[in-house]
Image (cartoon, rainbow, N blue to C red):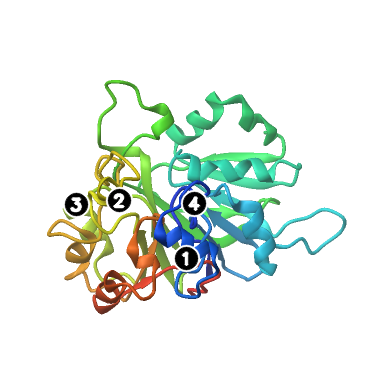
Amino acid sequence: MRALILGAAAGGGFPQWNSNAPGCRRARRGDPLAPARTQASVAVSADGEHWFLLNASPDLRQQIEANASLHPRHGLRSSPIAGVVLNGGDVDAIAGLLNLRERTAFGLYATAKVHAVLAANPIFNVLAPDVVARCRLPLHEATELCLPDGRGSGLHAELFAVPGKVPLYLEGQDAPKQVTGEETVGIHIRDGRSELYFIPGCAAMTDALAQRLRGADLVLFDGTLYRDDEMIRAGTGSKTGLRMGHMSLSGEDGTLAAFSSLEVRRKVLVHINNSNPVLLADSPERAEVEAAGWEVGYDGMMLL
Protein backbone atom coordinates (compact mmCIF):
# COMPACT_ATOMS: atom_id res chain seq x y z
CA MET A 1 0.00 0.00 0.00
CA ARG A 2 1.06 3.58 -0.67
CA ALA A 3 -0.13 6.43 1.53
CA LEU A 4 0.40 10.16 1.11
CA ILE A 5 -0.64 13.09 3.30
CA LEU A 6 -2.38 15.63 1.07
CA GLY A 7 -2.96 18.09 3.90
CA ALA A 8 -2.15 18.07 7.62
CA ALA A 9 -3.81 21.21 8.99
CA ALA A 10 -7.13 21.57 10.77
CA GLY A 11 -10.06 23.61 9.43
CA GLY A 12 -8.89 26.91 8.01
CA GLY A 13 -5.44 25.60 7.09
CA PHE A 14 -2.10 27.13 8.03
CA PRO A 15 -1.94 30.05 7.70
CA GLN A 16 -5.66 30.52 8.28
CA TRP A 17 -7.10 33.12 5.94
CA ASN A 18 -8.16 35.55 8.67
CA SER A 19 -5.46 34.87 11.27
CA ASN A 20 -2.77 37.40 12.06
CA ALA A 21 -1.33 35.28 14.87
CA PRO A 22 2.48 34.95 15.05
CA GLY A 23 2.61 31.44 13.59
CA CYS A 24 0.41 32.38 10.65
CA ARG A 25 2.52 35.48 9.99
CA ARG A 26 5.62 33.30 9.88
CA ALA A 27 3.96 30.89 7.46
CA ARG A 28 2.88 33.76 5.17
CA ARG A 29 6.44 35.05 5.07
CA GLY A 30 7.60 31.66 3.85
CA ASP A 31 9.52 30.86 7.03
CA PRO A 32 11.04 27.39 6.46
CA LEU A 33 10.47 26.59 10.15
CA ALA A 34 6.73 27.30 9.77
CA PRO A 35 5.75 25.75 6.41
CA ALA A 36 2.19 26.24 5.21
CA ARG A 37 -0.22 23.30 5.31
CA THR A 38 -3.58 22.66 3.68
CA GLN A 39 -6.54 21.03 5.41
CA ALA A 40 -6.39 17.40 6.48
CA SER A 41 -6.73 14.62 3.94
CA VAL A 42 -4.81 11.47 3.03
CA ALA A 43 -4.59 9.48 -0.22
CA VAL A 44 -4.07 5.69 -0.22
CA SER A 45 -3.51 3.19 -3.02
CA ALA A 46 -2.87 -0.53 -3.33
CA ASP A 47 -1.34 -0.32 -6.81
CA GLY A 48 -0.08 3.24 -7.21
CA GLU A 49 -2.60 3.79 -10.02
CA HIS A 50 -5.97 4.04 -8.30
CA TRP A 51 -6.27 6.25 -5.24
CA PHE A 52 -8.81 6.64 -2.46
CA LEU A 53 -9.05 9.85 -0.48
CA LEU A 54 -9.63 9.81 3.26
CA ASN A 55 -11.78 12.93 3.60
CA ALA A 56 -12.28 15.59 0.94
CA SER A 57 -10.91 18.79 2.41
CA PRO A 58 -11.91 22.27 1.20
CA ASP A 59 -8.40 22.49 -0.29
CA LEU A 60 -8.84 19.37 -2.45
CA ARG A 61 -8.37 21.04 -5.83
CA GLN A 62 -5.07 22.55 -4.66
CA GLN A 63 -4.02 19.19 -3.21
CA ILE A 64 -4.75 17.37 -6.48
CA GLU A 65 -2.67 19.86 -8.46
CA ALA A 66 0.20 19.55 -5.96
CA ASN A 67 0.42 15.75 -6.32
CA ALA A 68 1.11 14.25 -9.75
CA SER A 69 -0.23 10.87 -8.62
CA LEU A 70 -3.72 12.41 -8.65
CA HIS A 71 -3.50 14.05 -12.09
CA PRO A 72 -5.61 12.81 -15.05
CA ARG A 73 -3.72 10.38 -17.29
CA HIS A 74 -6.11 9.03 -19.94
CA GLY A 75 -8.24 10.70 -22.58
CA LEU A 76 -9.66 14.19 -22.29
CA ARG A 77 -11.23 13.60 -18.88
CA SER A 78 -10.26 11.01 -16.28
CA SER A 79 -8.98 10.73 -12.74
CA PRO A 80 -7.00 8.20 -10.73
CA ILE A 81 -9.27 9.07 -7.76
CA ALA A 82 -11.42 5.95 -7.39
CA GLY A 83 -13.24 6.89 -4.20
CA VAL A 84 -13.53 9.01 -1.09
CA VAL A 85 -13.95 7.67 2.45
CA LEU A 86 -15.37 10.13 4.98
CA ASN A 87 -14.77 10.11 8.73
CA GLY A 88 -17.64 12.50 9.46
CA GLY A 89 -19.79 15.35 8.21
CA ASP A 90 -17.69 18.34 9.28
CA VAL A 91 -17.09 21.00 6.67
CA ASP A 92 -13.36 20.25 6.57
CA ALA A 93 -14.13 16.61 5.67
CA ILE A 94 -16.82 17.08 3.02
CA ALA A 95 -16.50 20.52 1.38
CA GLY A 96 -13.92 19.23 -1.10
CA LEU A 97 -16.50 16.90 -2.61
CA LEU A 98 -17.82 19.91 -4.52
CA ASN A 99 -14.52 19.97 -6.44
CA LEU A 100 -15.32 16.50 -7.83
CA ARG A 101 -18.57 17.45 -9.58
CA GLU A 102 -17.59 17.17 -13.27
CA ARG A 103 -19.20 13.76 -13.87
CA THR A 104 -16.21 11.48 -13.35
CA ALA A 105 -17.16 8.25 -11.61
CA PHE A 106 -15.96 7.42 -8.10
CA GLY A 107 -17.32 5.80 -4.96
CA LEU A 108 -18.36 7.80 -1.91
CA TYR A 109 -18.00 5.77 1.31
CA ALA A 110 -19.41 6.85 4.68
CA THR A 111 -21.72 5.82 7.49
CA ALA A 112 -25.47 6.03 7.00
CA LYS A 113 -25.64 9.13 9.22
CA VAL A 114 -23.03 10.99 7.19
CA HIS A 115 -24.75 10.02 3.94
CA ALA A 116 -27.97 11.40 5.44
CA VAL A 117 -26.22 14.72 6.13
CA LEU A 118 -25.11 14.92 2.50
CA ALA A 119 -28.53 13.91 1.20
CA ALA A 120 -30.21 16.61 3.30
CA ASN A 121 -28.14 19.34 1.64
CA PRO A 122 -29.14 19.70 -2.03
CA ILE A 123 -25.82 21.27 -3.01
CA PHE A 124 -24.27 17.79 -2.92
CA ASN A 125 -26.63 16.73 -5.71
CA VAL A 126 -23.95 18.10 -8.03
CA LEU A 127 -22.39 14.67 -7.43
CA ALA A 128 -24.85 12.98 -9.76
CA PRO A 129 -26.06 9.68 -8.24
CA ASP A 130 -25.82 7.96 -11.65
CA VAL A 131 -22.08 8.75 -11.66
CA VAL A 132 -21.00 8.85 -7.99
CA ALA A 133 -21.97 5.68 -6.15
CA ARG A 134 -23.09 6.19 -2.53
CA CYS A 135 -21.72 3.34 -0.45
CA ARG A 136 -22.91 3.00 3.14
CA LEU A 137 -20.39 1.37 5.43
CA PRO A 138 -21.56 -0.17 8.71
CA LEU A 139 -19.33 0.24 11.72
CA HIS A 140 -16.86 -2.49 12.66
CA GLU A 141 -17.14 -4.35 9.35
CA ALA A 142 -14.21 -4.45 6.91
CA THR A 143 -15.31 -3.78 3.33
CA GLU A 144 -13.22 -3.90 0.16
CA LEU A 145 -13.18 -0.55 -1.61
CA CYS A 146 -14.15 -0.90 -5.26
CA LEU A 147 -12.92 0.79 -8.41
CA PRO A 148 -15.51 2.65 -10.50
CA ASP A 149 -15.88 -0.35 -12.82
CA GLY A 150 -16.76 -2.61 -9.89
CA ARG A 151 -13.43 -4.41 -9.56
CA GLY A 152 -11.89 -4.75 -6.13
CA SER A 153 -9.14 -2.28 -5.30
CA GLY A 154 -7.20 -4.51 -2.92
CA LEU A 155 -7.85 -2.05 -0.09
CA HIS A 156 -10.19 -2.87 2.78
CA ALA A 157 -11.73 -0.15 4.94
CA GLU A 158 -13.25 -0.50 8.39
CA LEU A 159 -14.99 2.38 10.14
CA PHE A 160 -15.17 2.43 13.93
CA ALA A 161 -16.72 4.88 16.35
CA VAL A 162 -14.55 7.28 18.34
CA PRO A 163 -15.68 9.94 20.83
CA GLY A 164 -16.46 13.14 18.96
CA LYS A 165 -19.22 15.62 18.28
CA VAL A 166 -21.79 16.47 15.64
CA PRO A 167 -20.69 19.07 13.08
CA LEU A 168 -20.95 22.64 14.32
CA TYR A 169 -23.48 23.59 11.63
CA LEU A 170 -25.80 20.81 12.86
CA GLU A 171 -25.65 21.72 16.52
CA GLY A 172 -28.85 22.79 18.21
CA GLN A 173 -29.23 24.45 21.57
CA ASP A 174 -29.46 21.07 23.28
CA ALA A 175 -26.76 19.36 21.23
CA PRO A 176 -24.65 16.95 23.28
CA LYS A 177 -21.09 18.07 23.83
CA GLN A 178 -19.81 14.61 22.94
CA VAL A 179 -21.18 11.63 21.02
CA THR A 180 -19.86 8.20 20.14
CA GLY A 181 -21.44 6.66 17.08
CA GLU A 182 -21.62 7.16 13.33
CA GLU A 183 -21.09 10.93 13.55
CA THR A 184 -17.30 10.68 14.05
CA VAL A 185 -15.35 7.59 13.09
CA GLY A 186 -11.82 6.38 12.67
CA ILE A 187 -10.80 4.71 9.43
CA HIS A 188 -8.70 1.53 9.29
CA ILE A 189 -7.20 0.79 5.87
CA ARG A 190 -5.31 -2.41 5.06
CA ASP A 191 -4.20 -4.32 1.98
CA GLY A 192 -2.83 -7.57 3.44
CA ARG A 193 0.73 -6.28 3.67
CA SER A 194 0.40 -3.01 5.55
CA GLU A 195 -2.18 -0.97 7.41
CA LEU A 196 -2.90 2.50 8.71
CA TYR A 197 -5.38 4.20 11.02
CA PHE A 198 -6.69 7.66 10.17
CA ILE A 199 -8.31 9.40 13.16
CA PRO A 200 -8.33 13.19 12.53
CA GLY A 201 -10.89 13.88 15.24
CA CYS A 202 -11.09 12.21 18.66
CA ALA A 203 -12.34 13.64 21.95
CA ALA A 204 -11.00 10.96 24.32
CA MET A 205 -8.98 7.76 24.45
CA THR A 206 -11.34 4.97 25.48
CA ASP A 207 -10.33 1.48 26.57
CA ALA A 208 -11.79 0.07 23.34
CA LEU A 209 -9.84 2.50 21.17
CA ALA A 210 -6.61 1.88 23.08
CA GLN A 211 -7.02 -1.86 22.62
CA ARG A 212 -7.66 -1.40 18.89
CA LEU A 213 -4.57 0.76 18.36
CA ARG A 214 -2.18 -1.19 20.57
CA GLY A 215 0.80 -2.35 18.51
CA ALA A 216 -0.48 -0.77 15.27
CA ASP A 217 1.97 -0.14 12.43
CA LEU A 218 0.89 3.42 11.60
CA VAL A 219 -1.58 5.81 13.24
CA LEU A 220 -2.43 9.28 11.93
CA PHE A 221 -4.08 10.97 14.88
CA ASP A 222 -5.86 14.15 15.89
CA GLY A 223 -3.26 16.85 16.59
CA THR A 224 -5.66 19.80 16.70
CA LEU A 225 -4.48 21.53 19.88
CA TYR A 226 -1.46 21.30 22.14
CA ARG A 227 -3.37 22.60 25.20
CA ASP A 228 -7.09 22.27 25.83
CA ASP A 229 -7.53 26.02 26.44
CA GLU A 230 -5.03 27.03 23.77
CA MET A 231 -7.40 29.15 21.69
CA ILE A 232 -8.85 30.86 24.76
CA ARG A 233 -5.34 31.78 25.98
CA ALA A 234 -4.42 33.11 22.55
CA GLY A 235 -7.60 35.15 22.27
CA THR A 236 -8.58 33.43 19.01
CA GLY A 237 -11.59 31.47 20.27
CA SER A 238 -13.91 30.84 23.19
CA LYS A 239 -14.08 27.03 23.18
CA THR A 240 -11.82 24.39 24.64
CA GLY A 241 -10.51 21.58 22.52
CA LEU A 242 -12.75 19.09 24.30
CA ARG A 243 -15.81 21.20 23.53
CA MET A 244 -14.81 21.08 19.86
CA GLY A 245 -14.46 17.28 20.01
CA HIS A 246 -10.67 17.04 20.14
CA MET A 247 -8.17 15.66 22.62
CA SER A 248 -5.21 17.89 23.37
CA LEU A 249 -1.64 16.70 23.03
CA SER A 250 -0.52 17.69 26.53
CA GLY A 251 -1.90 16.91 29.98
CA GLU A 252 -2.60 13.73 31.91
CA ASP A 253 -5.59 12.95 29.66
CA GLY A 254 -3.83 14.12 26.51
CA THR A 255 -2.65 12.28 23.45
CA LEU A 256 1.01 11.98 24.44
CA ALA A 257 0.06 10.31 27.72
CA ALA A 258 -2.64 8.13 26.13
CA PHE A 259 -0.26 6.68 23.54
CA SER A 260 2.76 6.29 25.81
CA SER A 261 2.10 2.60 26.49
CA LEU A 262 0.38 1.55 23.24
CA GLU A 263 3.58 0.57 21.39
CA VAL A 264 2.42 2.03 18.08
CA ARG A 265 5.28 1.69 15.60
CA ARG A 266 4.78 5.03 13.83
CA LYS A 267 2.66 7.94 15.09
CA VAL A 268 1.89 11.00 12.95
CA LEU A 269 -0.10 14.10 13.92
CA VAL A 270 -2.66 15.46 11.45
CA HIS A 271 -5.54 17.97 11.62
CA ILE A 272 -3.26 20.47 13.38
CA ASN A 273 -4.84 23.82 14.21
CA ASN A 274 -3.05 27.02 13.21
CA SER A 275 -2.73 27.92 16.91
CA ASN A 276 -0.81 24.75 17.76
CA PRO A 277 2.89 25.52 18.39
CA VAL A 278 3.97 22.07 17.14
CA LEU A 279 3.59 23.54 13.64
CA LEU A 280 6.71 25.59 14.40
CA ALA A 281 9.84 23.48 14.03
CA ASP A 282 11.75 25.59 16.57
CA SER A 283 9.15 25.47 19.36
CA PRO A 284 9.68 23.59 22.65
CA GLU A 285 6.32 21.91 22.08
CA ARG A 286 7.59 20.43 18.81
CA ALA A 287 10.65 19.11 20.64
CA GLU A 288 8.41 17.54 23.27
CA VAL A 289 6.18 15.65 20.81
CA GLU A 290 9.18 14.46 18.83
CA ALA A 291 10.84 13.24 22.03
CA ALA A 292 7.66 11.24 22.68
CA GLY A 293 8.06 9.51 19.30
CA TRP A 294 5.59 11.55 17.26
CA GLU A 295 6.04 13.01 13.78
CA VAL A 296 4.27 16.21 12.79
CA GLY A 297 2.52 15.61 9.50
CA TYR A 298 3.05 17.88 6.51
CA ASP A 299 1.66 18.19 3.01
CA GLY A 300 3.30 15.76 0.60
CA MET A 301 4.57 13.45 3.36
CA MET A 302 4.87 9.91 1.96
CA LEU A 303 4.01 7.42 4.65
CA LEU A 304 4.17 4.03 2.94
Residue type at mark 4: give it.
Gln
Q: Residue furthest left?
A: 252
Q: Secondary structure at mark 4?
A: loop
Q: Nearer the viewer, residue 66 or 50?
A: 66
Amino acid type, label 3: Thr
Contact (Cβ within 8 Å) of mark 3 with mark 4: no
The CA span between labels 2 and 4 is: 15 Å
Element marked by disc 1: helix
Q: Please name which of the two marks, 1 or 4, marks the residue nearer to the observer.
A: 1
Q: Earlier in the sequence, mark 2 or mark 1?
A: 1
Can residue 178 be seen here? The reply is yes
Q: Residues within 10 Å of mark 3 (few under 14, many from 20)?
A: few
Which residue is denoted by mark 2 in the rendering? 234
- Looking at marks 3 and 4 on the same chain, the residue that comes earlier in the sequence is marked by 4
Q: Are marks 3 and 1 in contact (CB under 8 Å)?
A: no
Callout 4 environment at 10 Å: few (<14), some (14 to 19), or many (20+)? many
Residue extending farthest top: 173
Residue count near mark 2 (Cα–Cα under 10 Å), binned few <14, some 14–19, many ≥20: few
Measured in 3D between alpha carbons, the distance from the residue under mark 1 to the one under mark 4, in whole angstroms, is: 12 Å
Q: Which residue is depicted at the point 57% across and 50% down?
A: 84
Q: Which disc, if any, is residue 16?
A: 4
Residue named by callout 3: 206
The answer to the question of whether label 3 and label 2 lie on touching residues, with beta carbons closer than 8 A, is no
Front of the two marks 3 and 4: 4
